[in-house]
Image (tube, coloured by chain):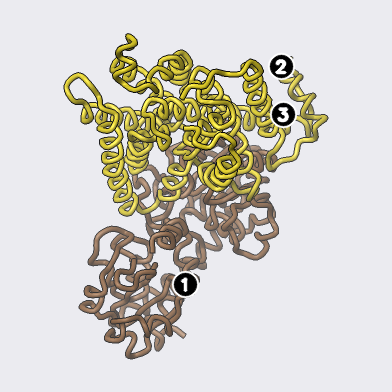
Amino acid sequence: MFPKCLFLLLIIPLGTACGPARTSAPGAISTEPPASEVPAGTSIRLTDDLGRTVTLSGPAQRVISLAPANTEILFAIGAGAQVVGRDETSDYPAEALALPTIGGYSGFNLEAIVSLQPDLVLAQGGGFNSPELVSSLEELGLTVYVLPNPPTVEAMFNNLGKVGALTGHGAGATALVDSLTMRVAALDEKILQLSFPTVYYELDATEPTKPYTAGPGSFVDLLIARAGGINVGAELQGQWAQISLEQLVVANPAIIILGDAAYGETPEKVAVRPGWGTLAAIQTGQVFPIDDNLVSRPGPRLVDGLEAMAKLLHPGVFK
Amino acid sequence: MVRAPANNMKIRPYLYTLLFLFMAVVLSITIGSVFIPPADLGRILTGWLNRATFSEPVKTFAFILTDIRLPRTVLVLLTGAALGGSGAAYQGLFRNPLADPYLIGVASGAGLGAVLAMSYKWPYSFWGLMAVPAAAFIGALLTVFLVYALARVGKTIPMTNLILAGVAFGSFATALTTSLMLRSTGELHRVISWLNGGSSQAGWHPVLAMLPFLLFGLGILLLSGHVLNLLQFGDDQAQQMGLPVTRVRTLILLAASLATAAAVSFSGIIGFIGLIVPHVMRLWFGADYRRLLPLSIIGGAGALLLADVMARAVMAPQELPVGIVTALVGVPFFLWVLRRAKNQGYW
């Protein structure tokens, strides 16, 4: 289980302890006038996740994204044409795949980054891109902005506003945030009257007797609650929590969501795991795969993930 | 055990290894994910010395060369030199073919220090960025001192005690490191990369920071060839020949550990170079430590540079942690050398 578990951990560093004090005031950006309304030649100043004040002389025109969520944000707010490079794991939207890659988890390639002559390198904080990488890029004279790893959906909206300001797509970001806010509000309202089923979200079950699940304070934990469910992992310790099969049998979740579906887990495989047959979710067939990229990347598709989750938890209400 | 060198063996080994190192440096400077035409390469290097300025696209090439490739080449070269030299010294000191620079806990101590430092979010500043290498360096040296103190019996340090204490404490530190990693949530890829020698901070700062320790450590090692030769006869005999065994041993241990700790702090843990390079040098050029030490230093530098070039090229534009390459490529190469060696039973 070790290697795969590690791999998963690499993929989903979401909701990790990003220094809460370092992010700039929540809501500060999305409420400001969009950058496109700022007169040309006015410089853009924003504080990033590392507490650095980043100054651009104007909207960035050649952006390199170091994280899949950043790439998704850039394309979603209409700055896709300004992106000139991406990290290896940025695979959405499809247009992004045509961009040159500049490395990934095993290492970022400084030469490739420099040769693309970016005027902005967009990194992700919270342990996703290391401070060593940021300092290396800074030392090479590049402008680096580290987006905080948002602890909530609303904080993610705030990130959209920041990227909008940096790229001159403030209006696009505001429009996107407005529509996403409405979708989340609609969902919140419907959830109010519902009873919450218990949910087990599987991150990794290479060892089916002690799989990993989303613990308290993790992003998936927040999304489950937001989508109208009770996360059985919320009782455990740590954001990456190991749960024993015994604990799982006692918790007896009504619904099982397979966040490891992309790694080959299926409801059929789960049903035949030794000892799992007693679980209510398996007897009633409430085992569902989910596209874990929707719930693990702090970009606009989180709202898709939230809606997908709500559909699984309340199929009668969300169609 | 110590062979009398044939006359033509005096200079040639140095020529061969220096040529190898030179080729490795050239490869390291020419090969990268961005192709720089050889014609530009020459112009940039001569222009760099004259502080000339260039226009695009040569300007970008020049920047890549002088600010990315050159510092990295020097850092890797120094790291390889430290590992090769320390490996040879440890093998001689312990009279053990399995000895490598990590035998008495430098790697496990550095790993524990680094992972501890990484589990805390340091402010983004010069000292914040120095936290991980500094913690690794301190962790490595603390481990060596602890192991040394544990292994000490009265006024002597029996080598067997040292090895056993080192291996035991190493397992202990590794267990702590692993438990920290399992508890950690986000920074794991940084840790794994560091533990496999994949950490690299750009620029000249790391080079400058490790240089004093390296010069001191390797300098002492270069002077200790004769002493290591004597130690091969065994403690009693060396003592009878007038060698203050314990004191000399402590000094060599300190020098090798200091060089290794400095190297590891900035580059992460790179395995096999310190084990294999001294053996290859011994197989090819004999076991006289007066020669083996400098040759292992040069050979280690060249070998690690070559591995680093492969680490950059294999999956470009992604980079593999160099420690993986040293094992994947270094081990088969070493086994090949070992099987071909004419002087079997060379140890």
**Dot 2, how many residues are within 10 Å of its Cα: few (below 14), some (14-19), or many (20+)?**
few
Q: Which chain is brown?
A: A
Of the pair A55 and B205, the residue shown nearer to us: B205
Q: Earlier in the sequence, mark 3 or mark 2?
A: 2
Amino acid at dot 2: Leu
Which residue is at the front of the view, A14 or A246? A246
Is the C-beta separation of discs 3 and 2 under 8 Å? no
Label drawn at residue B62? 3
Residue beneath the point at 34% across and 86% down: A282
Residue at 38%, 64% in the rendered image: A1
Residue at numbered disc 2: B49
- State whether residue B199 is above or below residue A315: above
Residues under labels 3 and 1: Cα distance?
Answer: 51 Å
Q: Chain of mark 1?
A: A
The reply to whether label 1 and label 2 mark residues of one chain is no
Q: Most extreme residue toward the left, as rendered?
A: B154
Q: Which SS class for mark 2?
A: helix
Q: Residue A2 at what x, y percent from top left?
A: 39, 60
Percent x, y for residue B347? 46, 32
Disc 1: which residue: A183
Type of amino acid at the residue the image marks with label 3: Ala
Which shade of the palette goes to chain B? yellow
In the image, residue B83 sits, relative to residue B320, either above or below, namely above
The x, y position of residue A256, in whole percent, is 36, 79
Q: Is label 1 or label 2 in front?
A: 2
Q: Position of residue B163 (x, y in %)?
A: 30, 34
Which residue type does callout 1 highlight?
A: Arg
Residue at horizontal 41%, vertical 50%?
A: B188
